[in-house]
Every structure is written in C-alpha cells, then in structure tokens.
C-alpha cells in the first residue's frame, strides 16, 4: 500500500477512507463524506475541503487510490474537521485493525487513568490519616512505658519496705539479746564477788556447794553473733532480676521493631485478589457451623489480671471484682482485665 493510501479521510478521520475517491488536487476522501460536504454548499462550484482549490461544477473524481494527472495544490489553511455525522466516540466495530487498535488503546488508557486517580485519592487520604495514627501510637507507647515505670516503681517501694522491715526486726532482736547479755554479765560479776568472799571461809563443804552452783550458766544458750552481716545477697538477687528484665527486653525488642517497620502506607506487592476470590468462604449461619472451629484453651495464670478468678484447670475465667494475691510476673496484665492462653 502506498503512503497516500495510509492517509485517513480528512473529514471523518476513517482509515482507510470508505469507498475512497480522489479529487483533482490529489486529496482523498470517503465518497459519502465528500458528497455530504458538497451538498451543503451554497453554489454549484466544487472545491477541495482541505486545500480549497476550486474545480468547477463537475470535477472529475478518481476511484480508489489511483494516481491523478494533476499536481497537488500547495498547502492551504488548517483543515476544517467539521462533519455532519462524525462523532469521535462512535467507532464502528466493523472498522479496520488500526481503528480497532486505537479504540482498544483508548479504553486501556481510560482504565489506567481511572486506576491512578483512585490510587491518588487513596494516597491523599492515607497521608491525611497517617499523622493521626502516629500520634495515637506515640500516646499508646508513652502510656505503656509509663505503666511499666509505675510497675517498677511499685516493686522498688516493696523491696525498700521489705528491707526496712527486716532492719526493724533484726534491731529488735539484737536489742533484746543485748539486754539479756547485760543481765548475764551482771549476774556473773555478782557470782565473782561472792566467790572472793568464800575464799576466806573455812567451810570447805560450803565452798564446794557454791562453786558447783556457780559453774552452771546463768541463762540458756545464746545466738551466735554474725560478724559479717551484710545485705550483699539482696544486691545480688536484685542484679539478677535486672539482668533478666534487660534480657527479656532485648529478646522482645526485635518484635517491637518489626511491628513498627511493618506499618506502611504503600504495599510493595498488592494482595492477590484472585487467590482471595477463589478461596471458599465457609458458611457460619448455624451454631453447628461455629462449633466445628471450637478448640479447648487454658489460661496462663501468670498473665491473668488480679481481678480474674481461674477455675477448672485454668479453663474457666470469672471476674468477681476483688483483687487476688497473685505473684508478680512480667506478663501479668495490670491495666486491662485480660489474660493470655497457652494455646495462643
């Protein structure tokens, strides 16, 4: 096909022109388009709709894409694309491959534009909501660490009170023992004075009797004084606790870090909609449908809030509104009345 045959009709842009005809100047049109254009004219003269060259009342037309003997006229003013029946959106399905390709490409571009505009709106909304999510996360983080600080502070005060109570108890015991020893010393000194007086007595029997009684202890056995008293074991126990807490934090820190870095407004890979759509959705309309997913669970007693009461092998949890004296544990809930399960 020649280069001229690859040109669309200047009036309706159909490629190739339908039932093409060539005017003497060399321009080609659809026969129906050219006839409609000439029929709208006010005079009987005919001219090329593209270059405005006049041909008289009955110009000779060449059929198809054959060459004409006349040379094409020089370029004229810009083409007037007005057409009585042409609509740029009405592409006939029976057109050629080029027309169909243009139509399909236009549809694809429209879909891509719609998708990108939807993504743009979603991104604007996400960027608007993200600062609020960050503010909420910072608030939650501050509250949790504040609760943790309060927990550690309460434990510090408990240990302080425990040490002070031990101090008071031991000082009381030592004071009582001190008074007892002072009485024993006074009694022994009294025996020593009487023994000196008996040294001048000629009664050997009396001397023997007194000496026998003085040899017996003035009181029962006494506790042995610890010359190396120290709270060193307490310090060691607290240092071990500190190291354990630091170890737990370092073990859980990667989990916290991963949770923070997983928060993203943009997904690197979109979800597989086909897999989600093809997955069967179970019917959960009846109680029997739900019971098939029932699994027995047991509650971790070290995580249960102190208002929760566990029974039946830690499988039943009730809230009575009173605090239980559960031992302290780093997994125990202090704020929320909750508990963890072993199976979770």
Image (cartoon, helix red, strand yellow):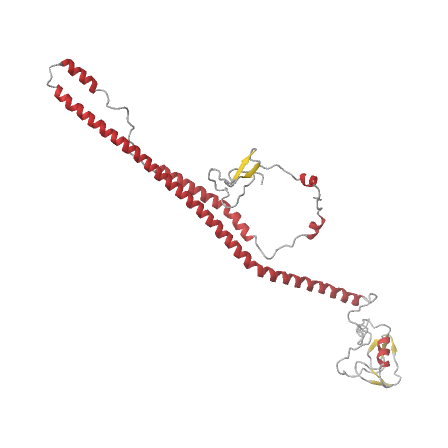
Considering every residue shown, the one lying at the far top of the view is 205
Horizontally, residue 125 falls left or right of residue 172, namely right
Q: In this view, does 276 lie above or below 25?
A: above
Evaluate whether residue 66 shows in this view: no
**Quarter the N terminus occupies:** bottom right
Given residues 145 and 233, the one toward you in this image is: 145
Instruction: Please tell me whether residue 289 is drawn above or below residue 226 in the rendered image.
Output: below
Identify the residue shown where x is 13% and y is 19%: 198
Q: Can residue 162 be seen in this view?
A: yes
- 211, above or below 78, in the image: above
The image position of residue 99, as x and y in percent, is 79, 68
Residue 61, how many percent across, how many down? 88, 79
Q: Position of residue 184 (x, y in %)?
A: 23, 27
Q: In which quarter of the image is residue 314?
A: top right
In the drawing, does residue 293 fall left or right of residue 75?
Answer: left
Residue drawn where x is 45% and y is 41% of the image: 244
333 with respect to 76 (left or right): left
């Amino acid at each position: 096909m020649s280069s001229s045959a690859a040109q669309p009709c200047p009036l309706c842009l159909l490629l190739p022109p339908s039932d093409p005809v060539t005017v003497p100047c060399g321009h080609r049109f659809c026969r129906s388009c050219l006839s409609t254009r000439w029929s709208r004219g006010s005079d009987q003269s005919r001219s090329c709709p593209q270059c405005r060259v006049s041909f008289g009342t009955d110009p000779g037309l060449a059929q198809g894409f054959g060459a004409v003997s006349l040379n094409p006229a020089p370029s004229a003013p810009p083409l007037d694309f007005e057409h009585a029946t042409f609509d740029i959106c009405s592409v006939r399905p029976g057109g050629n491959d080029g027309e169909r390709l243009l139509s399909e490409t236009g549809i694809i571009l429209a879909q891509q534009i719609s998708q990108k505009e939807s993504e743009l709106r979603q991104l604007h909304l996400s960027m608007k909501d993200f600062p609020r999510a960050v503010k909420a996360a910072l608030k939650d983080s501050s509250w949790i660490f504040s609760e943790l600080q309060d927990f550690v502070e309460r434990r510090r005060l408990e240990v302080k009170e425990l040490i002070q109570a031990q101090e008071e108890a031991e000082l009381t015991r030592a004071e009582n023992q001190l008074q007892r020893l002072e009485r024993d010393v006074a009694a022994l000194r009294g025996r020593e004075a009487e023994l000196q007086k008996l040294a001048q007595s000629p009664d050997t029997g009396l001397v023997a009797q007194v000496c026998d009684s003085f040899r017996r202890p003035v009181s029962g056995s006494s506790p042995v004084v610890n010359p190396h008293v120290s709270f060193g074991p307490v310090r060691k126990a607290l240092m071990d606790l500190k190291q354990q807490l630091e170890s737990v934090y370092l073990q859980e820190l990667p989990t916290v870090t991963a949770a923070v870095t997983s928060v993203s407004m943009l997904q690197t890979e979109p979800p597989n909609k086909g897999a989600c759509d093809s997955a069967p959705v179970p019917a959960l309309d009846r109680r029997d449908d739900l019971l098939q997913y029932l699994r027995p669970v047991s509650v971790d007693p070290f995580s249960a809030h102190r208002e929760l009461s566990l029974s039946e092998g830690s499988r039943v949890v009730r809230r009575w509104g009173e605090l239980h004296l559960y031992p302290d544990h780093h997994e125990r809930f202090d704020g929320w009345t909750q508990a963890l399960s072993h199976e979770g």
